[in-house]
Image (tube, rainbow, N blue to C red):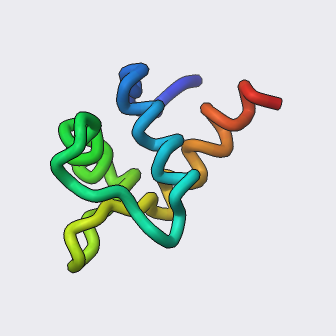
Amino acid sequence: MWNEPYLETCCRSALHRLTLVRPHGRPDGLKDGPCLQRLAGMGLARARPDGRFEATEAGLDRHATEIARKRA
């Protein structure tokens, strides 16, 4: 049974971008800023002290099971 909150397409893309830039993080204030905030609220991303966002372990797991799985 599916029990995970639904991710809009834009938020799925934002999560994928977080996995691509791993150590660098994504700065706030870009077009995907609202999605980064939403992902942070869901526990899939977090804001770092330097103002950039990075994926959490939960975000990396969600990406692996939902987004990367479709690319394989």
**In the image, is residue 15 above or below residue 2?**
below
The residue drawn where x is 55% and y is 53% is 19
The image shows a total of numbered marks equal to 0
| The quarter of the displayed image where residue 2 is located | top right
**In the image, is residue 72 above or below residue 57?**
above
| The quarter of the displayed image where residue 7 is located | top left
The residue drawn where x is 27% and y is 58% is 27
- Horizontal arrangement in the rendering, residue 62 relative to residue 31 (left or right): right
**In the image, is residue 40 above or below residue 16?**
below
Quadrant holding the N terminus: top right
Instruction: Point out the residue furthest to the bottom here.
Output: 49
| The quarter of the displayed image where residue 70 is located | top right
Residue 35 drawn at (x, y percent): 27, 37
The residue drawn where x is 66% and y is 39% is 65
- Horizontal arrangement in the rendering, residue 56 relative to residue 39 (left or right): right
- Horizontal arrangement in the rendering, residue 8 relative to residue 17 (left or right): left
The residue drawn where x is 45% and y is 43% is 15
Residue 67 drawn at (x, y percent): 62, 33
Residue 32 drawn at (x, y percent): 28, 37
Nearest the viewer among 45 and 10 is 10
- Horizontal arrangement in the rendering, residue 10 relative to residue 19 (left or right): left
**In the image, is residue 14 above or below residue 43?**
above
Instruction: Point out the residue furthest to the right here.
Output: 72
